[in-house]
Image (cartoon, grey):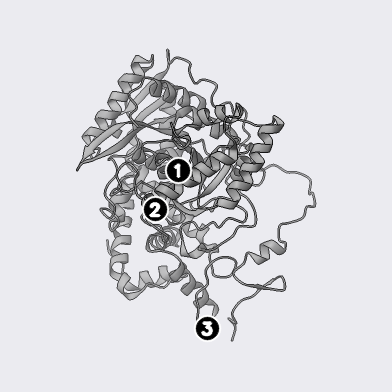
Amino acid sequence: MKYSEMDIAALSALLQKREVSARELAADALSAIAETDGTIGAYLTVAEEEAYRQADAADEMLKSGTAGALTGIPFAMKDNICTKGVRTTCASKMLGNWLPVYDACVTEQLKKAGAVMLGKTNMDEFAMGSSSENSALGVTRNPAAPDYVPGGSSGGSAAAVAANECAFAIGSDTGGSIRQPASFCGVVGMKPTYGTVSRYGLVAYASSFDQIGPLTKTVADNAKVLEAISCHDRRDSTSLPQYDTNYSALIGKDLSGMRIGMPKEYFGEGIHPQVAELVKNAAKQLEQAGAVIEECSLPAVSYALPAYYVLCCAEASSNLARFDGIRYGFRAEGIEDLDQLYRKTRTQGFGREVRRRILLGNYVLSAGYYDAYYKKAQQARTLLIRAFAELFAKYDLLLTPVAPTPAYKIGEKSNDPMEMALGDICTVPVNLGGLPAISVPCGKIAQDGAELPVGFQLIGPAFSEAKIYQAAAAYEKSGIAAR
Amino acid sequence: MELDAKTMETLAWLSRLDIPQEEEAPLSASIAEMLSFFQQLSALDTAGVEPTAHIAPLENVLREDEPFSPRLDRDLLLSGTESEDGLITLPKVIG
């Protein structure tokens, strides 16, 4: 097996035995990128010098006996996370050549762990989208089927893992942006409990939903990466104290006594029948592994999608007000007055979808509409949180599809933002509730000669990551997870 | 639901965006479509329900003031659009 095809656990074992050096692994990963990324387009920036510098530091850690589970492991970072001295674009013309002068907390944590960053990955501009087609800087293709989208917004991160162009990747998830591309590309993606990973240095889209998390080849790898990046950080006022960060603790334990609910609303109209079938097959596997599976009901999901879009557009319109042509990034030419400086810069610097969401956000926040839209959506959020709490009084976890369909063709939905938004129906309730949820590959659907991966989603109450990984790993071990 | 030209103009001003003429019709239709979709929320009974602005169970915590060096250093200034002698430069915007 090639190094680039190995998971973190296997690579780490080789590094610890000194059968390969971090520098050799970095060189191998960079040549894998050179070989395949011309077709896939997962990376916006390949940071070769930086990768070798970090690999040399990792080799020192390995020599001095201070290495951990991620030391020397090559990874990719989503391009909305600040990396000192390596350009961070958010796939936008607005930040096209912006060089951050500081590292995000997650970047610091991974450097501390000795992981080796290979580069920055493509995404929907400012993380707004579900196919990565809203990138102003390039197209990313699904490694399983190159005519199809990789999902989004962390499409580059998911594609990089699936195409063996890194051992793991970091993404961010505001309404499904880690889990849906993980499902489309056939990798494991975790959105942790809100507040688990510091947002310091993550370019804000919708602050009350945004959360950083790992994309990996296996469930155990995913837990290891989350262990490295979670921390309480005073620079992010919403970062929470982390009492128990041993997310791998329950992996390998059997599932006897675990109760898993399947809310019937996630399997109804609009869900591709084969997606529903694959998720139900996964339920059978979990049952055989000892879990008790029951159908349940979560009617509150029916208004999750409108509530989510009201709130995320409102937060985006506020967060993106900072891009004014003065402090960083792009500035339009031919300016005559201050108002024109703002308007021309923002009109030319932001892509169409970003401008659409800013306009929508300002509409729902404007005088006369605030109560009808923004406050109403916040109240709907409260009702959904209560509904989840009632279900978690009965069940340890919930099992659902990640997306209603497998990946679609590039260009198929890019001119219909409404239809694209409907694809987020299974993932946004989790963000409204601040809950942790994972996407795990559970099979493939044959379509037009392509084999399109599909994932299931396991949702848990806040801070139940270890239990989610336990169930996901038990499923993975059952052997039918086709990658 | 339809958005008239005046509403679009106000929205554009609030957002500090121009709406190119060729985008006006599709953009206004697309925003109207989303707003109709948002109308689903009006059917929901939310009497007496507290709005949730944020999920984290956070409370204000008071602490002693501690002086520290803010990051407004030379590097940060130089990461601005344009700079000269450690200061951000801007086009002349006041007549």
Chain name for mark 3: A
Q: Position of residue B34 (x, y in %)?
A: 32, 56
Which label is found at residue A38? 2
The quadrant of the picture occupied by the N terminus of chain A is top left
Q: Is residue A444 above or below residue B67?
A: above
The total number of labels drawn is: 3
Which one is nearer the viewer's eye here, A66 or B81?
A: A66
Q: Amino acid at mark 2?
A: Gly
Q: Is residue B57 above or below residue B27?
A: above
N-terminal label among 1 and 3: 1
The reply to the same-chain question for discs 1 and 2 is yes
Which one is nearer the viewer's eye here, B6 or A400?
A: A400
Q: Is residue A323 visible?
A: yes
Q: Position of residue A277 (x, y in %)?
A: 24, 29
- Mark 3 sits on what residue? A336
User: Gap in Å between the C-alphas at discs 3 and 2?
Assistant: 42 Å
**Residue at image coords 38%, 43%:** A181
N-terminal label among 1 and 2: 2
Q: Residues within 10 Å of mark 3 (few under 14, many from 20)?
A: few
User: Gap in Å between the C-alphas at discs 1 and 3?
Assistant: 47 Å
**Residue at image coords 67%, 65%:** B77
The reply to the same-chain question for discs 3 and 2 is yes
Q: Is residue A232 visible?
A: no
- Mark 1 sits on what residue? A165
Q: Residues within 10 Å of mark 2 (few under 14, many from 20)?
A: few
